[in-house]
Amino acid sequence: MGLMDFIKKQFIDVIEWTESGDGVIAWRYPMADNEIQHGASLTVRESQLAVFVNEGQVADVFGPGRHTLTTQTLPLLTNLKNWDKLFASPFKSDVYFFSTRGQIDQRWGTQQPVTIRDKDFGAVRLRAFGNYSWHLVDPRKFIAAISGTRDVYTATELEGQLRGFMLQHISDAVAQSGIPFLDLAANQIEFAVQLKQAVAPEFAAIGLALDSVTLQNVSLPDELQKVLDQKIGMGMVGGDMGKFMQYQTAQAIPKFAEGAAAGGSGIAGDAMGLGAGVALGQVLAQNLQQGLQGAAAGAAAAAAPVAAAVGLKPEEIMATLEKLADLKAKGILTEDEFSAKKAELLKKLV
């Protein structure tokens, strides 16, 4: 009886996988030295596939359900082993189970900025990140390209390769979408669709289906973002350089005032003061030009500033002097700068 028990342990009657481990997508049934009983039961649960492999060659693939293993249900394995249809003895074969459950919320993102061609900027280095999901559909391809004869293969082990697929096709996706960088944030769904179409063949080549791709954020490196902010500022004033200088000065004055209040000095402080003087001079020039009235339409370009100055109203010049005095009091203009502007304006008072 002991010998019979021993013999029975060598034959496998039921083959199944309960998927006890998280993230396992390929699992090899532990055959050891045992053999599969002819007529044994193979149970494949929903979201699973089972594959019989003979000496490295993929034979029969079974989907969800309960299957009785005979030469009729194992036609490819029967052919590989040269069995006749009356074969009814125990046999050896490697059996692999695969999980076809969706692997969701997989993250992708650019560790370093990716350079792309852009309609507006020519070349742009952008950062992007999002998520994607996939599931296994072709175990034959997966065994050949990825898992091989491994006992266990997990989704975690695939993350690096799949993320690489996503990143290497970002440029293709931007080009195919035709969406300029400035519009990407407002067209994230379209960009994600193009990215999915570009990457899906890479997944299919290893037996996977790319189910979804989302883009959660797209941005520029800090230094390029500053340039973009300036371009946006120019757009706000319609590309007029004089108005743009007014815009920049308005943004900079509070910072200069803070620096002066904190007792800022040295090269940086001098540079800030010089920049403020230049910018303020340009702003004042714009204000003076806006006050021009009655200049002759056909006057020569060289005489225009003189004619404009003569036409200034005394109250406008006094208002400008008051503004200059206020800037001097706040420490934004030096005494010499204020005196020079004051003398210039008083000469034009008529």
Image: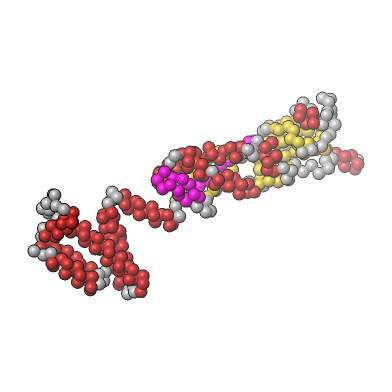
> Is 171 left, or right, of 286 in this rendering?
right
Q: Residue at x 53, y 37 (%)?
A: 197
State whether residue 220 is above or below residue 172: below
Determine if residue 216 is in view: no
Quadrant containing the C terminus in the rendered view? bottom left
Q: Which residues are magenta?
A: 114-137
Q: Looking at the picture, how far across and down is residue 15, in whole percent?
A: 75, 37
Q: Residue at x 70, y 39 (%)?
A: 144
**Viewer-proximal residue, 6 or 53?**
53
> Is 32 left, or right, of 287 in this rendering?
right
**Viewer-proximal residue, 35 or 196?**
196
**Viewer-proximal residue, 221 or 296?**
296
Q: Looking at the picture, how far across and down is residue 189, in whole percent?
A: 45, 40
Chosen colour scheme: secondary structure
Is residue 122 part of the magenta span, yes or no?
yes
Q: Main secondary structure of the magenta part?
A: strand
